[in-house]
Amino acid sequence: MPDQPTYRRVLLKASGEALMGGQGFGIDVSVVDRIAADIVEARKLGVEVAVVIGGGNIFRGVAVASKGGDRVTGDHMGMLATVINSLALRTSLVKMGVDAVVLSAIAMPELCESFSQRQATAYMDAGKVVIFAGGTGNPFFTTDSAAALRAAEIGADALFKGTQVDGVYSADPKKDPNAERYDRLGHAEVIQQGLTIMDTAAIALARENHIPIIVFSIHEEHGFSAILRGNGRYTVVSDE
Ligand code: UDP
């Protein structure tokens, strides 16, 4: 018998970079399958799961802007990258027998459905895994902000932020061996100390809506479902 899950409805945010594995660009299907398998385990616990995936493995708007290009067009390209990643995750989930749907912030009806809050919550109530593509649909935002926004819209009990490491540290533990790891922090502390787990807009939105952020390693096999079972290694960002 699995332990009783702590959360009823959660949103998982994975960066696009997480999907590329060791490739340096694009999508490593074995990595997408591993993340999908973890989501399947979460669903088996009875937890309702929504997902936001970034696009950094394919394209980032700032990359265009830094070379003197048009930022808005670059961001449009970045948002399209998130749609590609979302379709890859849906494919993996469906292959594993889980009903999953992609809802895009930018209408592209030939590829997937468009986002609406009512449709999203209806699908979640029906037990589907809902993947939010296209970020917020606006340039100058990030998929972290999209994750906090969608988490608030669907009434998620927690936002799971999958990162490169197993929690929040005072400095990058891959560069600084003296970096301190936190088990628990307040939203305000994260903002004040400039800890770069998510952008400030995302943390502020989560804070205003009383949504705890669970920071864990996206590279840990079964890492997401283990936390939902009450185990695993993570940092909780919460003011409660
Ligand atoms: N993006 C955007 N608006 C959004 C979300 C994303 O313009 O609401 C664009 C932006 O160019 C960003 C890219 O999509 O660089 C990929 O998203 P992000 O950098 O958040 O992906 P991640 O770092 O999580 O892979």
Image (cartoon, grey):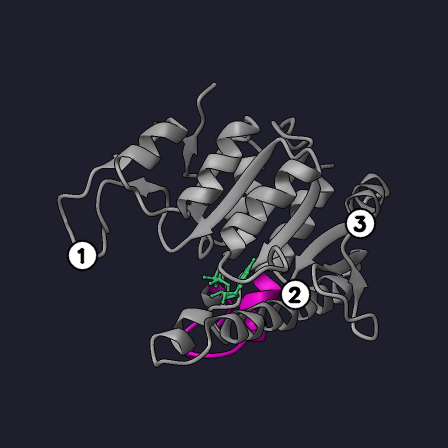
- Residue placed at 68% from the left, 56% from the top? 132
Disc 2 is placed on an element classified as: helix
In the rendered view, would you say 26 is above or below 120? below
Nearest the viewer among 5 and 100 is 100
Label 3 within 8 A of ligand 1 by Cβ = no
- Residue placed at 45% from the left, 53% from the top? 220
Earlier sequence position, callout 1 versus callout 2? 2
Q: Amino acid at mark 3?
A: Lys
1 and 2 marks in contact (CB < 8 Å): no
Crowd class of label 1 (few under 14; some 14 to 19; many from 20; radius 10 Å): few
- Asked if residue 59 shows in the view, the reply is yes
Label 1 sits on residue: 175
128 displayed left or right of 53: right
Label 2 sits on residue: 86
- Residue placed at 23% from the left, 56% from the top? 174
Magenta extent:
18-34
Residue 95 x, y percent position in the rendering: 76, 67
Q: Separation of disc 3 and disc 1 at Cα?
A: 40 Å
Earlier sequence position, callout 3 versus callout 1? 3
Label 3 sits on residue: 128
188 displayed left or right of 39: left
Residue 57 x, y percent position in the rendering: 47, 72
Does the magenta portion include 23? yes
Disc 3 is placed on an element classified as: loop
Q: Amino acid at mark 2?
A: Ser
